[in-house]
Amino acid sequence: SYADAEQIALAINAQSPLTTDVADIEDFIRFLATQQLLQASDPADCQRLAQHHLATQTGFWTWLLHHYLFMRLPLLRPDPYLKRLRPLFNPLFSRQFVGLIVAVTLLAVYLLGQQWAAFSHALQVVLTPEGLLSTALMLSLTKLVHELGHAVAASHFGCRVPTMGVALLMGLPVLWTDVSDAWRLPSRQQRLLIDAAGMIAELALAALASVLWVMLPEGALRNGTYLLASTAWVLTLTINLNPFMRFDGYYLLSDALDIANLQDRAFALARWQLREYLFRFNVPAPEHWRSGQRRLLLAYAYGTWGYRLLLFAGIAWAVYHFFFKALGLGLFAVEIGWFIIRPIAKEIAVWRVLHQHLKTPWTPRWSWLIPISAVVLMFIPWHTQLIMPGLLRANTEQTLYSPQAAQVKRVLVQDGDSVEPGQVLIELGAPDLDFKRQDAQQRLAALNEQLAAHSLELALARHNPMAVEALQSTLAELQGLDAAAAKLTITATIAGQVRDWSDVALAGAWLAKDEVIGIVASHPQTVVAYTEEADLNRLKPGATGYFYPDGGDLPPLKVRIAAIDRTGTRQLTLTELASTYGGAVAVREDPAHHLIPELAVYRITLNTDYAAPLALTMRGRLSITTPPESLIGRLIRSAIAVLVRESSW
């Protein structure tokens, strides 16, 4: 042992090919002390460790702020049990067992191929509420098998498995196993097997479940094996094979490349390349890599950054909607600030430090052209068109229907004809109604004769009020029957064009009560569109544009804004524009089957002078000419609109 840094430096220089000095040794000692890698041998060292421990402690609310999205709860120390059970698990790693699993898998593939129609049709079971609950239970079972696979494999190769537990990922329980001791294994093959053991266990379970599904009779047990064979392992593998998060896929990639601490080293290389590309600091790379390795690490780093940007933005959105509005806005700001803005700000701070330390001049470089051009484009007001979904439809419509069960007597128009107000379109007849009218007319005539005879004797007329009442009742009945008969002659109430004429509305055919016969659509037609809240201020009544019908078979129609709603649409009534029916307006269906827009949208009505025959309704896209606007201006207005709307609790 050596008492001080000077003795250590002299010993290294004398006993090794390295050359060092006291400053290097002191820096190294400080690094070891900071990382708590030195043994405490006196009260001063103990006090230093205690101070370091206190400095790392945070308050409850600070801790909760950084751990409410992901929190690990250790539940079990399985290492002693795994050591005792190791003789039972060792056969699982034999060639015979591997051959058995391969044989079962091949058998499962063959059997499912024979019954693929029934297997794929059984997916409907998963889509029911009971099926979703069963899927959650089977998913828990597969996760348990998955984690046991990691633990058993790590114990088999002599690694410690100190902890197993549950992690709360955005409030959802997820099992986890600590197999970090596997990094000590010199064999890359053993590390890869530990990394993949969980997924291998799940696939083996799925193969066994597939064979059982074929053999078992209908029932709950067969449904459970179906879930294990189809959905549960697919969901877990989809998550675990993602190399951009620190799940199995990441460790598989790290060990396959034989690059320990892959993510941090790739990030360091990507940051170095970005700095050199932008500023030419001429700083050596953090590590030397072969050209192929360097390209792979850079691709991984940039891919992970892009994935994390989308992931954290999605988490921020989910957090905002999960909590009540006041807390949601705060947590949304924390997520965006901590996970997206903070890393960018830290990197920019590093640029400033390097510039000051290396005295690198801020000279323009070609590498600046792309980001500067992107920033300039964001501020140039080049956006002069606003695109939104729209629906072309008649300004006024008259629906023609049979007022009662009736027979078609005459059809006077056909689909596509132009009609005028009052024009007769179709005549219907109802024999039952004709019989009732004839009977009422006969009774009315008889009552009139009776009262006329009684009127010769005034005294008799005064003492016969029932005859008068019967006359009035019959007269009212006949008037009602005449009105019903008049309705059987259907006329146009507006000028327009006959559309969607029923194929069964032919002479002699019978129509049911309230059966739709056709529609009279007026001219000119109108376009109804919906725009987002952020674009509302760019639209004014009188603004012009074009409506482009879907399909491309018709020319664009010139339109002019007639009216703009100033209150948001709470319920979408035009189903043709709803996303659930193939439209472009994102909606969700509430328990009452109302279509509720996911975003704040506003209704706009536009007029068109196009009078040629068109389909009754037609979806399309509107392009409206608006004042020029820059992208940054749109982003600012969108953010302000969201804040104003969402802060109104």
Image (cartoon, grey):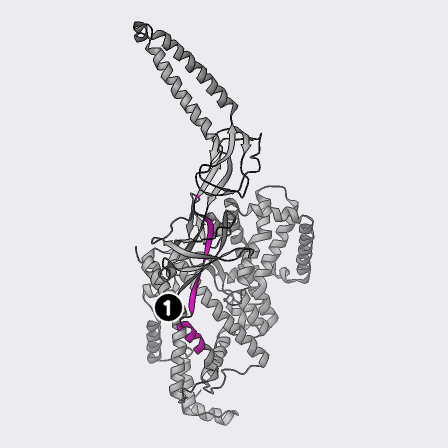
Q: Vertical placement of 364 versus 259: above or below?
A: below
Describe the element under mark 1 as helix, strand or loop: helix
Q: Vertical placement of 122 versus 481: above or below?
A: below
Q: Position of residue 54 (x, y in %)?
A: 33, 72
Q: From the viewer's perspective, tell me whether residue 483 is left or right of residue 567.
A: right
What are the residue bounds of the magenta stretch?
371-396
Instruction: Locate residue 604: give its quadrant.
Output: bottom left
Front residue of 115/194: it is 115
Front residue of 386/271: it is 386
Q: Position of residue 618 (x, y in %)?
A: 50, 51
Q: Vertical placement of 35 versus 634: above or below?
A: below
Q: Kindly identify which residue carries mark 1.
A: 633
Q: From the viewer's perspective, tell me whether residue 628 is left or right of residue 259.
A: left
Q: From the viewer's perspective, tell me whether residue 262 is left or right of residue 599.
A: right
Q: Quadrant of the C terminus?
A: bottom left
Q: Position of residue 431 (x, y in %)?
A: 52, 23
Instruction: Locate residue 318: give its quadrant.
Output: bottom left
425 falls in the magenta region: no
Q: Hey, what amino acid is under mark 1?
A: Gly
384 falls in the magenta region: yes
